[in-house]
Image: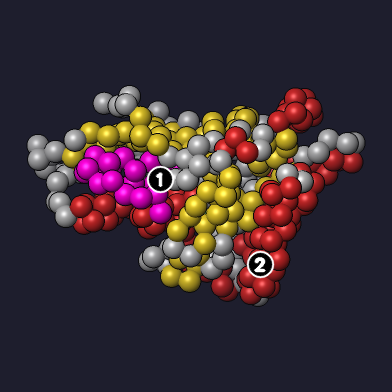
Amino acid sequence: MKCTAVAPANIAFIKYWGRTDATLRLPANPSVSMNLSASTTTTTVEFSNGYSEDSIELLETGGFSAKENRRVIRQLDIVREYAGVNTRARIVTKNTFPKSSGAASSASGFAALTMAAASALGLTLPEKELTMMARLGSGSACRSIPDGFVKWEGEAAYSLYPHAYWDLRDILVIVENRAKDVSSSAGHDTAGTSPYFPERLKRIPDRLARLERALAEKNFRAFGEVTEEDCLDMHRVMQTQTPPLFYWNDATRTLMEAVRVWRSTGIPVYFTIDAGPNVHLLCEGNNEGRVREALSTMVGIADVIVNAPAEGAHIVTDHLF
Ligand code: DP6
């Protein structure tokens, strides 16, 4: 049977960095994120006895490396094992944003793949189970399954608030389309070599409480402050692990500085950055125009993707083949 799923990327306000079990992708700390409306992966999976091997095709944005192919097949195997079948599959997938640019393509990719494959094999899994299965492909993928604003703790992820709860914007500024050198998967494994890693973990409970309070109260300033703080803290860990990971470039730093200047002129905007050079500008919907206008004066920007909060992964009827 053939099934197609669409899954959003997500942006974490409290980040997942480091884990207690690399194989099971169990996180060292809980994380909280928002699904992104304009950064999605669509994946069609068809299982058939007519296929002698699995085939994977990435449309439009370049192919997968051999390593990425293996990771996709490993995830298919997890779903097949759960369903108790051994049928091979054809997979066709498409992103709306550049792969491996820190735009979290692994999150939307593994969420869409897991949901489409499970559904194509006739599995009807509760959302919690699906988040657990997606997590095995990529940790952050579990946060792309539930609706809107999502918390991942331990094995599973769940929705804190639906996407319509708060009209936020994530203005993703793509400063460079070059694929990053170090994957975040490898980075998680050495996070513990940073002397600041235990420090960060100690601060997480208080930070989570502050973030969840800010979300409950829709207090944008408190939300922005704690989000920026955790981003900088994660990057401090990244930059001091062995080997150190530096994801920022000149354009990243220029934007981070610009955000501070914009704030001082009265524009309520904060930034966050994942494992790549691109900058996510966070503001409320009614300030989108002001942020975009401020951004239009900047040079060295390759692309801008404006995201609102989005629903989680879901099945659609339009197939890619
Ligand atoms: C920096 O989910 O990509 O974006 O579990 O190895 O696939 P794997 O890692 P991944 O890590 C994402 C790290 C991050 C922070 C976050 O999204 O929470």
Q: Which quadrant of the rendered structure holds the C terminus?
A: top left
As helix, strand or loop, the secondary structure at mark 1 comes to helix
Q: Which residue position holds label 1? A: 111
Q: Is residue 90 left or right of residue 108?
A: left
The residue under label 2 is which amino acid type? Pro
Q: Is residue 53 left or right of residue 139?
A: left
Q: Residue 76 appears at what percent x and percent y?
A: 27, 50
Picture quadrant of residue 303: top right
Q: Is residue 224 left or right of residue 40?
A: right
Identify which residue is drawn at 14% across, 46% down. 87
Closer to the chain start, of discs 2 and 1, is: 1
For the residues labelled 2 and 1, the Cα–Cα distance comes to 27 Å
User: Which stretch is magenta?
Assistant: 108-128
Q: Residue 220 appears at what percent x and percent y?
A: 76, 44
Q: Nearer the viewer, mark 2 or mark 1?
A: 2
Q: Which quadrant of the rendered structure holds the N terminus?
A: top left
Identify which residue is drawn at 31% across, 49% down. 125
Q: Which residue position holds label 2? A: 205
Determine if the magenta segment contains residue 112: yes
Label 2, ligand 1: CB separation under 8 Å: no
Determine if the magenta segment contains residue 216: no
Q: Residue 174 appears at what percent x and percent y?
A: 61, 36
250 or 100: nearer the viewer: 100
